[in-house]
Amino acid sequence: YKFYILLFLVILLPYGYFLHWIGGWNEASRLDLTYSMVERHSFNIDPYHENTGDKALRQGRYYCDKAPGQSFFAVPAYILIKTAIKALRLPVSFNAPDSITVFYLVTLFCVGVPSAFLGVVFYKFIGYFTEDKRFQLLVTLGYSLCTLAFPYSTLFIGHQFAAVLVFSAFFLAFRMKQA
């Protein structure tokens, strides 16, 4: 298991090094929903709607117009991050969407960590087709760090999050078929 932990960390490190926050509407809309669920116990994003154009207006209320899975997944991570920052008394603002630190940590834990986990799953999957460990590693690192999986693993958008879920389900089904 030491190798898998090392592989996970080798993939996670570059994901954690980069932060692609350019004020994107896609990211903001999803994060606004997470903030709203935790801070206001509401699904509308009314207090935050001005920072995104990706929103839906319904009966005078603004809502995130994205699939909500990633925002829901981020709720426990946001709560833990917020609790840890407060417990450590770090000087971090929680004024959404102003807090780059909170945004970075939520993105890292909710997209980067699952994506690095996908790298380990992908490595194991390639092992079904070859016994060459170097080839497995090369293909895994090639996918994880040399394709669009890399930038999408640093953004709070749904692409890589969906890839993790879909490939993990595929891998589980593949293993069940092999057994």
Image: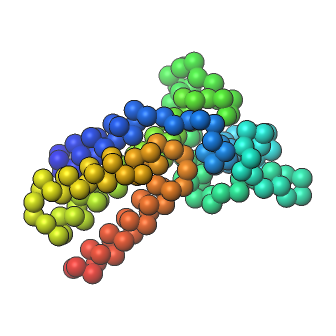
Give whichever of 142, 71 is nearer the camera.
142
- Mark yes or no: residue 148 visible: yes
Count numbered badges in the picture: 0
State the residue at coordinates (53%, 20%).
90
Q: Which residue lies furthest to the left in this view?
A: 131
| Left or right of residue 149, residue 124 in this image | left
Give whichever of 76, 179 is nearer the camera.
179
- Mark yes or no: residue 37 visible: no
Vertically, is 80 above or below 29? Answer: above
Vertically, is 108 above or below 115? Answer: above
State the image coordinates of residue 10 (x, y, percent, origin top left).
Answer: 27, 40
State the image coordinates of residue 137 (x, y, percent, origin top left).
Answer: 19, 52
Give whichever of 148, 59 is nearer the camera.
148
| Left or right of residue 25, residue 150 in this image | left
Coloring applied to the structure = rainbow
| Left or right of residue 171, residue 134 in this image | left
State the residue at coordinates (40%, 47%).
150
Give whichever of 16, 94 is nearer the camera.
16
**Quadrant of residue 132 in the image?**
bottom left
State the residue at coordinates (73%, 38%).
51
* Quadrant, the C terminus: bottom left
State the image coordinates of residue 129 (x, y, percent, origin top left).
Answer: 17, 70
**Quadrant of residue 130 in the image?**
bottom left
Vertically, is 176 above or below 15? Answer: below
State the image coordinates of residue 145 (x, y, percent, origin top left).
Answer: 33, 46
State the residue at coordinates (54%, 55%).
158
Q: Which residue lies furthest to the right in this view?
A: 60
| Left or right of residue 37, residue 172 in this image | left
